[in-house]
């Protein structure tokens, strides 16, 4: 499941804080997470491509939609619109019909708009710069980070529901994670091992989907239990 590492000029903050756990805990977390991912990472179709367009399609489809529902539609949609230029040249309502029955139906219109803007402004090539991605309507912080990490192998952080839950449980252990989103975003960035943004982010999402689930998490077999702030029986911080 591992993607070859590349160099990255970014260096993490040197001192520990709520958003930047101490180096020993960071190393343990990252090492155990990546080892778990090597053994248990899911084989998903969008992990077999580096095409920014195909990765963007998968990320938009996965918004508020379960993986098992997305997989067949992902293949079908790309069969009809194999390139971003094909999508941009289509009619919005045709794109909407090809999206059915995934729901959350603003998404196909947004994706079509992104395709047209990309053709008009960037010659049909999805940009890799965060500011350019997020300037397009329909691409927020998470989607921009996912495209940068998964298509361009940059050490860009992503925080979705699964990632938020894992980081909050392991490192914070109290409070409302939604109210701590800025801390969790900073933490997600600080934790990425240099050059491993692709694997680290995929691993985090899988870990939240398979082990650290919203209901009935597998705490007893969790590789993070020795330092997880919410592991049952572990003393709570004051």
Image: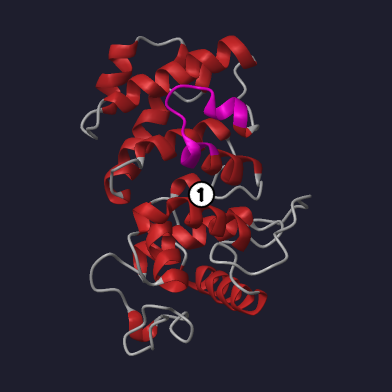
Residue stretch rendered in magenta on the structure: 131-144
**Residue 207 visible at all:** no
Residue density around tag 1, few if under 14, some if 14–19, many if 20 or more, within 10 Å: many
Residue pointed to by mark 1: 158
Task: Tell me what residue is drawn at x 29 percent, y 24 percent.
Answer: 106
- Against 41, residue 151 (above or below) is above
Q: Position of residue 150 (x, y in %)?
A: 57, 45
Q: Position of residue 197 (x, y in %)?
A: 62, 54
Is 138 within the magenta?
yes
Question: Could you tell me which secondary element the residue under label 1 belongs to?
Answer: loop
- Against 233, residue 133 (above or below) is above
**Quadrant of the snapshot with the C terminus:** bottom left
Is 229 within the magenta?
no
**Quadrant of the snapshot with the N terminus:** bottom right
Q: Is residue 149 left or right of residue 176?
A: right
Q: Quadrant of residue 118?
A: top right
Q: Is residue 101 left or right of residue 23?
A: left
| Viewer-proximal residue among 66 and 39 | 66
- Against 77, residue 72 (above or below) is below
| Viewer-proximal residue among 58 and 181 | 181
Q: Position of residue 51 (x, y in %)?
A: 58, 35
Task: Tell me what residue is drawn at x 31 percent, y 67 percent.
Answer: 213
Task: Tell me what residue is drawn at x 37 percent, y 62 percent.
Answer: 165
Q: Position of residue 76 (x, y in %)?
A: 34, 32
Task: Tell me what residue is drawn at x 51 percent, y 23 percent.
Answer: 83
């Amino acid at each position: 499941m591992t993607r070859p590492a590349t160099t990255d000029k970014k260096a993490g903050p040197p001192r520990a804080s709520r958003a930047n756990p101490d180096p020993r805990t960071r190393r343990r977390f990252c090492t155990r997470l990546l080892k778990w991912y090597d053994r248990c990472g899911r084989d998903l179709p969008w992990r077999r491509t580096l095409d920014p367009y195909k990765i963007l399609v998968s990320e938009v489809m996965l918004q508020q939609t379960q993986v098992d529902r997305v997989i067949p539609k992902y293949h079908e949609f790309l069969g009809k619109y194999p390139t971003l230029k094909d999508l941009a040249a289509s009619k919005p309502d045709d794109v909407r019909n090809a999206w059915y029955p995934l729901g959350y139906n603003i998404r196909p219109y947004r994706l079509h708009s992104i395709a047209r803007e990309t053709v008009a402004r960037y010659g049909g090539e999805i940009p890799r710069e965060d500011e350019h991605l997020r300037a397009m309507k329909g691409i927020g912080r998470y989607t921009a980070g996912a495209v940068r990490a998964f298509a361009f192998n940059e050490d860009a952080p992503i925080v979705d529901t699964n990632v938020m839950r894992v980081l909050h449980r392991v490192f914070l252990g109290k409070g409302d994670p939604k109210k701590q989103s800025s801390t969790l975003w900073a933490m997600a960035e600080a934790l990425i091992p240099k050059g491993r943004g692709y694997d680290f982010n995929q691993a985090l999402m899988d870990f939240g989907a398979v082990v650290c689930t919203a209901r009935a998490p597998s705490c007893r077999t969790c590789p993070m239990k020795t330092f997880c702030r919410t592991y049952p029986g572990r003393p709570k911080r004051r």
